[in-house]
Amino acid sequence: MTKPSLTLFGSTGSIGSQALDILRQRPDLFTIHALTANGNAALLAKQANEFRPSFLGLAEDSKIDELKSLLQYKPVILSGKNMVQEEDLYHSDLVLNALVGFSGFVPTMNALKAGKRVALANKESLVVGGELICNREKGLLERIVPVDSEHSAMLQCLVGESMEFVKKIIITASGGPFRTFSKEKMERVTVEDALKHPNWTMGSKITIDSATMMNKGLEIIEAYWLYDLPVERIEPVIHPQSIIHSVIEFTDGSSKAQLGPPDMKVPILYALTYPTRIDYPNPVLEWSSKMDMTFEPVDHARFPAINLAVQSIKAGGFKPAILNAANEVAVAKFLNREIRYIDIPSLIAETLTQYEPQGQVTYESLIECDREAREVASKLLLH
Ligand code: MN3
């Protein structure tokens, strides 16, 4: 039997690197068709020399010479920021989309339109394009397997169940580094404070999203599209230990949860092998040692980002795409020390008020909406 092939968008990031760690241990799972990176030519070359994909993609043109000088074989190299449009990248059985932010939207759409299965680590694809993927074009959703740990947990609890018996989804959140901070203390937090996540080691964008809890807001939208449940029935709860990755509550009063140490390799592996499982030495919980699991409600006054996300999906249309664009601009400005941590939700709320595009949600109009929302958000002066 021939091995299925894999395209990995974002191979040099946190999720991409961990996926390749798995495939290094289990080369029997996939042949690597293509790897892409934004600008880390050195790591991309190292990965390519090891896994020998036929195609490489590098978004930053200026790094092409560096990449070529480091390669020990001759793959086809695609470059530039439109590289993700190259059809050759999608000639594989599975596409793992581990890109960060809106940049992941186009590859998700391209892969789905090419009839491919998508292991989706890029939650922003569904935040921006959920309506298109789930309502407008038939059969696309069935080909998505989530990599996000909460959504993988939900899927693992839902296998063998019927959605008609699902009462609610309880989506767990670590609460991030500022879970116990007062509003006053939040006014003074630095970029360094925000980048220190208590449980997960991740890229900087998602780490800041976790600190503001916008990450949970984006994930509620992601769950809304994946599992087609009214947003009121998707309930966030703080669980600081990140052991329970989400819970499904059924109509008969029974609940199912998926548990494990916080380690992204479990959901990555599940997305790669779904609907089956394989034997793989991921870390497991030590049930014989003392283990605390605590839960607390979300304080929306201190973490307003979640409700901004919930309101945007209730309003629908372009609102979630605007929310996402404004959030990306706000996070970049915060990381660049142009705005304070507490200004992030204000900037998003203000962008949602000021920018109200008209018309139908289409692939093209979403791309235009993202561009314009970024412009509006970039020019906002907070006072
Ligand atoms: Mn998550």
Image (spheres, rainbow, N blue to C red):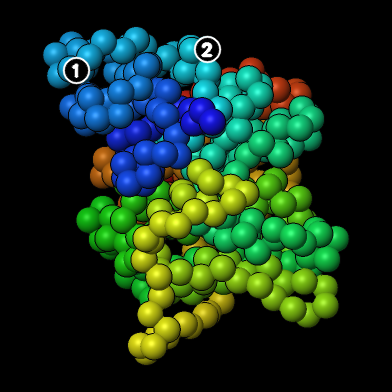
In this view, 242 is above or below 338: below
In this view, 183 is above or below 137: below
- Residue visible at 51% across and 28% down in the picture: 2
Q: Give x and y (percent) for residue 73.
A: 22, 14
Left or right: 292 with respect to 304? left
| Circle on res. 231 | none
Q: Give x and y (percent) for residue 9.
A: 42, 30
- Quarter where residue 196 is shown: bottom left
The residue lying toward the viewer, choosing from 17 and 278, is 278
Callout 2: 10 Å neighbours few (<14), some, many (20+)? few
In this view, 50 is above or below 202: above
- Residue visible at 70% across and 22% down in the picture: 362
First in sequence, mark 2 or 1: give its number.
1
- Residue at disc 2, secondary structure: helix
Q: CA distance from mark 2 to mark 1?
A: 23 Å
Q: Amino acid at mark 1?
A: Leu
The residue lying toward the viewer, choosing from 381 and 171, is 171
Callout 1: 10 Å neighbours few (<14), some, many (20+)? some
- Residue visible at 65% across and 52% down in the picture: 223
Residue that mark 2 sits on: 87
Left or right: 316 with respect to 283? right
Q: Give x and y (percent) for residue 349.
A: 55, 47
Which of the two discs, 2 and 1, sits closer to the camera? Answer: 1
Res. 329 in view? no
Residue at the outermost right position = 164
Residue that mark 1 sits on: 71
Res. 303 in view? yes
